[in-house]
Image: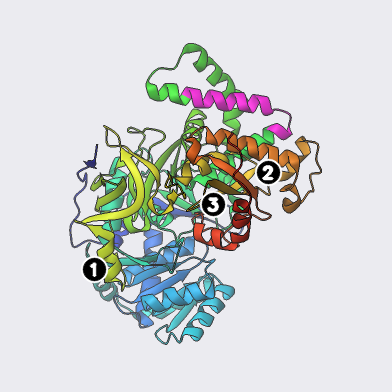
Amino acid sequence: MREYSVPPMVDVERSSNITDLLIRQAGLASNPALFSRRDGEGTWQDITARGFLADVTALAKGLVASGIAAGDRIGIMARTRYEWSLVDFAIWFAGAVPVPIYETSSPAQVAWILGDSGAAGAFADGPAHEQRIREAAHSEGLEGLRHVWQLDGKTLDALREAGRSVADDALDGRRRQAGLDDLATIIYTSGTTGRPKGCELTHGNFVELALNAGAALPEVAHEGARTIMFLPLAHVFARFISVLCVACGVTVAHTPDVKNLLPDLQSFRPSFILAVPRVFEKVYNNSMLKAEDAGKGRIFHAAADTAVAWSKAAQAGKVPFLLAWKHRLFDKLVFHKIREAMGGQVHYAVSGGAPLGERLGHFFHGIGLLVLEGYGLTETTAPVSVNTPRLVKIGTVGAPLPGNAVRIADDGEILVKGVCVLRGYYNRPDLTAEAFVDGWLRTGDLGELDADGFLRITGRKKEIIVTAAGKNVVPAILEDRIRANALVSQCVVVGDQRPFISALISLDEEALPGWLERHGLPAGTSVADAATLAPVLAELQALVDEANQSVSQAEAIKAFRVVPADFTEASGHLTPSLKIKRAQVLQDYAGVVDEIYAVPKPAQR
């Protein structure tokens, strides 16, 4: 199939906007809890729709009293926390446009985003973030940035107090100015290359997509459902889910520090979570390592194989009696422990940002957690397509959500059209023109549609490696298989215009000590030293050999090197959404790559 579209399930008044989603929830007799936050004693306290609305309007009035005009851009640079969503909605109620900034952004990135968007003000997480914003504004001469507020209680209280003079009617008139076609936010792509581009997303992108996604996922997003937000709200995935939860009456908690994620999951007990594939890889690998450290590795691996087999059989429509019996046994021995670690009430997980991998998808389904893998970009307000509990094919990213359409171009590129698609790039009509062909957005990703309209991602157009012999190689196929091992943190396949394919591999610092100990090696060995050990290299060679079974000889990895340090966001090699900055890796490790190709081509394996 070359094209598949799904008509909208929900029609929306053109005069409405995101603020109406909150107004509607506050008007319900049930007055659902939209958020939950810890009090001074660490107990989760719910915040109802009416309570949230009251605080949002108080802050919005403060923004109006401070001189923020309709259409003004306001930056938000903070960790994932309740106040992030609070000021996000307050900015919308004031008729202004929020501009998220990753809290890990460098001063140069902060200056670029604030300057390019023409921000009139910004919210900062705390003193350090405020200082970074002010330094950026000073260095670039951003005279239009008139206000910098912190998200602490005193600053927000001052805004609330300042807004007391603003009449309700004045604020209501301000919030009603925007319609579905008007600008709601500018989200700058985290960018694996070049300067971030400002994606103009409209109120319609969020409202129409949220209401249609809610209609397609009623088992997941509904009043009484609970989720805990730990991905950065500056990322479009978490931002869209935050709006979706308000639209559907879901209770949202926040975890600013992922180090506290497990205890927060266990105390809050969400019904669904959202994460990027690396999080699911970590959950699987940590569970496996914990079992191996306790001498129960064989049991875990048998349980994992059973979970995958059960999921595949269930998806095919028939689970054999013996497999069903083994599945029940391992549920008592293994699976329930993993579910309890995530709070015990998680039935669904939404995954996006990168391909999850079929085996992981089947594993989690087999343990009782259905991962609903989806696909989207910043340019598509996050999800174009997603698996749903009723329409799921593990290994795909689902069919288009209602109101969206997917087309596969002649060269395999995924093209998108629908309620999710941005209106353009801010201040860049040239990029906007390049991004569209006959009204369809070019995604830059490669994929295929099956007979039922389910989309499968096969690679990234810009990341295709063309060897010196002219062979096209999709690196993700090899990288995903190698990275699935607990010993590996990241894998970057290289070989563009080179005589053969090779790879750079980094070790997982958390998994390494246990692996070394189980193999009779000193657990305190550094990553750099471990990268030279014969047993480590032999293990990695076995992984490479196994991954090579999935591709042709011309595409197979013929050599690899273990780098002495991990590829991380802090090192500049990962985006905030944990995607590899391939060009930066190749630049920083050019010497290592050159050394690989300075020796004769390895013998065929």
Looking at the image, residue 198 sits to the left or right of residue 300; the answer is left
Would you place residue 111 above or below residue 229 in this image? Answer: below
Q: Nearer the viewer, residue 90 or 469?
A: 469
Q: Is residue 304 a member of the stretch shown in magenta? A: yes
Reading the image, the residue beneath label 1 is: 176
Q: Nearer the viewer, mark 2 or mark 1?
A: 2
Reading the image, the residue beneath label 2 is: 511
Look at the image and tell me whether residue 13 can be seen: yes
Q: Image point 65% across, 53% down: which residue?
A: 563
Secondary structure type for disc 3: strand
Secondary structure type for disc 2: loop
Which quadrant of the rendered structure holds the C terminus?
A: top right
Q: Nearer the viewer, residue 455 or 349?
A: 455
Structural distance between the alpha carbons of marks 3 and 2: 32 Å
Residue stretch in magenta:
292-310
Question: Which amino acid is tagged 1?
Answer: Arg
Question: Nearer the N terminus, badge 3 or badge 2?
Answer: 3
Which quadrant of the rendered structure holds the N terminus?
A: top left
Question: Which amino acid is tagged 3?
Answer: Trp
